[in-house]
Amino acid sequence: MLEGVKVTDIKKLPDERGFFAEVFRQDWKDFVGNDKIVQVNLSMVYPGIIKAWHRHKRGQVDYFIVPKGAIKLCIYDESKKQLDDITLSGERLQIARVPGHYWHGNKTLGFEPSLIIYFVTNLYNYKNPDEERKTWNDPSIIDGKTGKPFDWNMSPHK
């Protein structure tokens, strides 16, 4: 994993009524460190949709949870030409920490929309957004396994 990228399981407590899970706690010091969450966002993404690439240059850290559906979350370090991908799913509740200086994006997997909750450490500034963007198929994002531009639609079995 790229430095600062972390993934941890979330304790899911099922009972006859459903389940309960704490999805984020400030006292998870091994995971959160000194990050302070200031905004929480919810995104619904249709199957097969790719939302990529962007990064934050002002120190923002993003935390992603997928309570419904599944996504492939990709994180790319431009200087090392290293790409990490993480599958997040409602089937296995996890939270992923992504330092915002890495290029990152996601694709909804399967046949149902995904729900993504993401916590961020910087408020969104409408007048001066902390977002640098590339197109979803930008050829400068290199897949370390193939040495070629990253292909969001490549079969995982090849």
Image: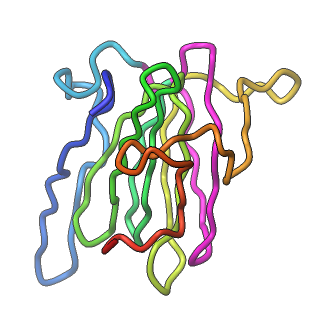
* Residue 45 left/right relative to 154: right
The residue lying at 34 percent from left, 59 percent from top is 88
> Which stretch is magenta?
36-60
Left or right: 101 with respect to 49?
A: left
From the image, which quarter does the N terminus lie in?
top left
Residue 15, above or below 56: below
- Name which residue lies at 12% across and 84% down: 16
Question: In this view of the protein, which residue sits in the foreground, 145 or 78?
Answer: 145
The residue that appears at 41% across and 40% down in the rendered structure is: 83
Residue 93 placement (x, y as % from top left): 25, 60
Q: Position of residue 75 (x, y in %)?
A: 45, 39
Q: Does the stretch in magenta take in 86?
A: no
Instruction: Please tell me which residue is depicted at 72% across the width and 29% down the height of the picture.
Output: 131
Horizontal relation, residue 126 to residue 9: left or right: right
134 shown above or below 67: above
Above or below, 139 against 72 in this view is above
Q: Position of residue 154 (x, y in %)?
A: 48, 69
Along the line of sight, which residue is nearer the eye, 42 or 142?
Answer: 142
